[in-house]
Image (cartoon, coloured by chain):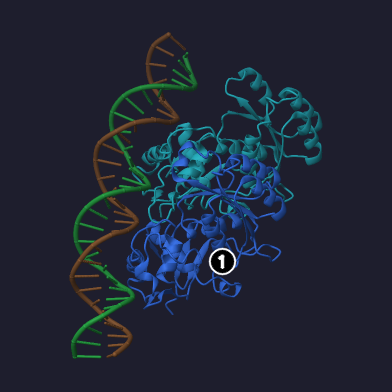
Chain colours: A cyan, B blue, C brown, D green
Amino acid sequence: MTTTASRTPAGRATPPSPETPATPATRTARTAPLHRADGTAPRVLVVDDETSLADLLTMALRYEGWEVRATGDGAGALRAARAFRPDAVVLDVMLPDLDGLTVLHRLRAERPETPVLFLTARDAVEDRIAGLTAGGDDYVTKPFSLEEVVARLRGLLRRSGAASSRPDSLLVVGDLTLDEDSHEVHRAGEPIRLTATEFELLRYLMRNPRRVLSKAQILDRVWSYDFGGQANVVELYISYLRRKIDAGHEPMIHTRRGAGYVLKPAA
Amino acid sequence: MTTTASRTPAGRATPPSPETPATPATRTARTAPLHRADGTAPRVLVVDDETSLADLLTMALRYEGWEVRATGDGAGALRAARAFRPDAVVLDVMLPDLDGLTVLHRLRAERPETPVLFLTARDAVEDRIAGLTAGGDDYVTKPFSLEEVVARLRGLLRRSGAASSRPDSLLVVGDLTLDEDSHEVHRAGEPIRLTATEFELLRYLMRNPRRVLSKAQILDRVWSYDFGGQANVVELYISYLRRKIDAGHEPMIHTRRGAGYVLKPAA
DNA sequence: GCCGTTTCTCAGGTGACTCACAGACGGCTC
DNA sequence: GAGCCGTCTGTGAGTCACCTGAGAAACGGC
């Protein structure tokens, strides 16, 4: 609604992130805290020389409840790896000083078990990446959505055992289920086919059940950071989701006029 | 009620000063003091070059019991961030010297954990504030209502952990409850559907139970600062609320003729 | 390079919401 | 008890937020 907001009375243009922003405190309402075995928050190292992107990631991951450190070059990354001992690394493959592969090798030498999430340009050489991720790592192409990065990072942490919390990747809200690993979605036992964007949107909603999410929040979280389009894509995709999920059932997706959308169990 | 009839658009007396000029003493009657872990008041930095707006915000936030500092430009903001060490920042994205994003980056570099509430013009939102809300930050479009700003700021402080007070977002008065996250309202267990304005009005009342609120105060607090309409919208909306909340129950909303309205438990 | 799929823009339609106006109601004062 | 004034509320109009169909453009698999 960024654009919509024309509210007369109070400028209550339903900004974006009202409530949801999820923080440690609120986060309890969300899916799973995802702590390490010793009860502390997982540590994530972000390596990217674009400071605005590094900022964005840092904020988003912190918001997720993780402890985050950021650095802009390969040398700093190696230093941080030693000092900070991260449970996972987000690594831009294009760095100013060292190239991604070199950084990776040295990281591996330092901390062999630490999973890495690569950030790469869309047109980067595909097979090169394939080699990189062979060891159970993962990658995301720029421009990415935060939902995507967070989801993959969660996956890596979960699999590496850095996170002790329940290993299940199943989100459940009422009779609606979504498996983050297999990407399967069911309503009342019936399988539902979703497109990539629909899936991501639904995942975001299901990770924040019963909470009003503004269109701006959704846009910031589910669409890639450089999306420059109309804000009403959100309405459009909500509409698609309703057709696939709520059709023939008691609706779970509700509109809070002037505020956003809420997902909650039909009951 | 001297002010009532005379409330001309611009006139809008009763600036920010919500209920009484706010003394710590009075404040105790309100919801939650919302202190920091060390018992001191949260510190909020306001950055806006329109002095009248900055003043308005300063007064309203001070009234809330917070320690406030205001500055009109980006350079001052950075200085203040260092010296004042705020727990949250209210940042106008349109500043005379630096643009909002630059200020944001430097703020982040300085104090990475500090949540930011952005103020933006309605139509400036068009060119995306991409990612601004992604990290748990929030924003409000001008013209805003004070109730809106305060509520969102409370949310940010609550979530960032700067405020030690209970993290729940539930307001309770008698058998009436209002959840600021899900926007759900219940009376005696029965769910109640409210419009955006009704919700905001009720939130204001519930944050000031057993206290007489004049129409002027309500108008100043719940409606946006540039509202130019008739003062009796308040009566109208009180009337709406009564129908939805008091219908079939012992009334909780009472008129204090010549003074204002009070919300209190039915008891 | 072609075809099905997916993403997104655009624009029309509709119901919800906000608010002005004005008459009815009721307490208070003299 | 009459009149005044503050408050309440029905009506109606204009606006706004949201929904959704249709089609253009981009993508991806073969």
Question: Could you tell whether A253 is left or right of A91 in the image?
Answer: left
List x then y, in percent, for residue A98.
Answer: 75, 24
Image quarter where the C terminus of chain B lies is bottom left
Figure quadrant of residue A45: top right
Secondary structure, mark 1, is helix
Residue B257, how many percent across, how many down? 36, 78
Residue B189 in view: no
User: Dot 1, how many residues are within 10 Å of its Cα: few (below 14), some (14-19), or many (20+)?
Assistant: many
Give the x, y percent position of residue B187: 41, 68
Q: Nearer the viewer, residue A201 or B35?
A: B35
Q: Which residue is mark 1?
A: B63
The mark total stands at: 1
- Residue, x 67% and y 49% (percent of image)? B113
Identify residue type, mark 1: Tyr
Residue A218, percent across and down? 49, 42
Please tell me whether residue C21 is drawn above or below residue A56 in the rendered image: below
Residue visible at 73% across and 23% down in the picture = A99
| Residue at the (33%, 44%) spot, across then down | A248
Q: Is residue A244 above or below residue A40?
A: above
Q: Foreground residue, A11 or B202?
A: A11
If the image is split into quadrants, where does the N terminus of chain B sit? bottom left
Q: Is residue B41 left or right of residue B258?
A: right
Q: Is residue A253 visible?
A: yes
The subunit carrying tag 1 is B
Identify which residue is drawn at 56% across, 74% down: B26
